[in-house]
Image (cartoon, rainbow, N blue to C red):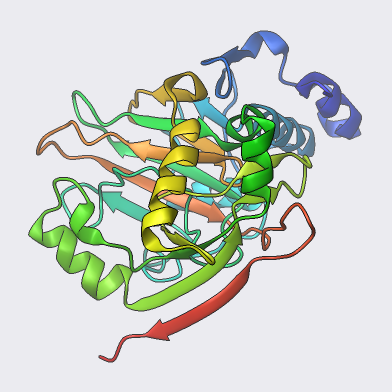
Amino acid sequence: MTTATSIARKAATPSTTDFFIPEADVVRRAGRLGAEIKNVRLSGDLPLAAIDAIHDLLLRHKVIFFRGQEHLDDAEQERFARRLGNLVPHPTIGALKGTASILELDASRGGGRADQWHTDVTFVDAHPKFSILRGVVIPEFGGDTVFANTSAAYEELPDALKLLANNLWAVHSNAYDYAVKPRATDADRKHFEEVFTGTVYETEHPVVQIHPETGEPALLLGNFVQRFVGLTKNDSQKLFDLFQARITAPENTVRWSWTAGDVVIWDNRATQHYAVNDYSDQKRVVRRATVDGDVPRSVDGRHSILRKKVTKAA
């Protein structure tokens, strides 16, 4: 694997030849994914060498963490995010006013506690490539985010389960059974019914997708899965539980304890995440910029298919 340092030097222009991220500033946070990057001030003005190095580290570690980014506001967060690709708003919630893609997750409002394992927005066909999340208001205790490596989970499967997974397709939808969501409030339910499912999507994805940049196979599951194509709901649930347990096994995860001003970037094509709902009624606000992705491809070359998009009557 090419190191961040060599990528930075290779991509450097005469005005940026002295910029690189030394290996000493890349601190691994767990065995299978996650690294904290030190001594980098994120902005839309970073030289190409820096962006190339960050991109390489993101592909390698799946999720990367930056402390001390209090200087970022919504506009600068998006300027930086655009250096990683085209921005896209949430398909049902939209973007914060005056922004292209910023999604505010406020625990005091409906829909602000993402306390289920998921890959972002898999109910559409081209789900996001990268997510860039900024800590705005962080509770005194609790509110960590846990990430899981879906590529490592696939790699660890026995050959018989790999073969099974390679041939499975799953229906993902934003209209899932909200009754199973733990500790949902009335405001959460109202937001879910009126906003999050204002347009209902159903998409068929391969259970194993091939990463378009690294070529790695990864399990594509999470809480938006409704069933497996060709199987009953009961059989689907048993298989889902089997594969999902491999993804979220503790040794396949990394946990991040937030402070205000932190920025976390994850590869949405190779991870799942879970926002731990253990901070009671404390205020927690994070804001996410989202980079548009490609339609997933299966191991046999087929692509995901959007089967349904229905907007509810006003």
Looking at the image, residue 113 lies above or below residue 203:
above
Asked whether the viewer can see residue 99, the reply is no
223 with respect to 300 (left or right): left
Q: Residue at x 54, y 37 (%)?
A: 265
Viewer-closest of 139 and 230? 230
Q: Quadrant of residue 146?
A: top left
* Residue 140 picture location, percent across and down: 18, 24
Q: What residue is drawn where x is 22% and y is 36%?
A: 277
Q: Which residue is at the far top?
A: 24
Q: Nearer the viewer, residue 195 or 230?
A: 230
Identify whether 41 is placed above or below 106: above
Check the picture and name the quadrant holding the N terminus: top right
Q: Position of residue 207 (x, y in %)?
A: 59, 52
Looking at the image, how many numbered discs can be counted on the residues? 0
The residue under the point 75% across, 64% down is 302
Q: What is the residue that sits farthest to the bottom in this orientation?
A: 313
Classify 142 as above or below 311: above
Identify the residue shown where x is 64% and y is 29%: 158
Q: Quadrant of the C terminus?
A: bottom left
Could you tell me residue 133's position as x and y percent? Answer: 45, 42
* Quarter occupied by residue 54: top right
- Which quarter of the picture shows residue 149? top right
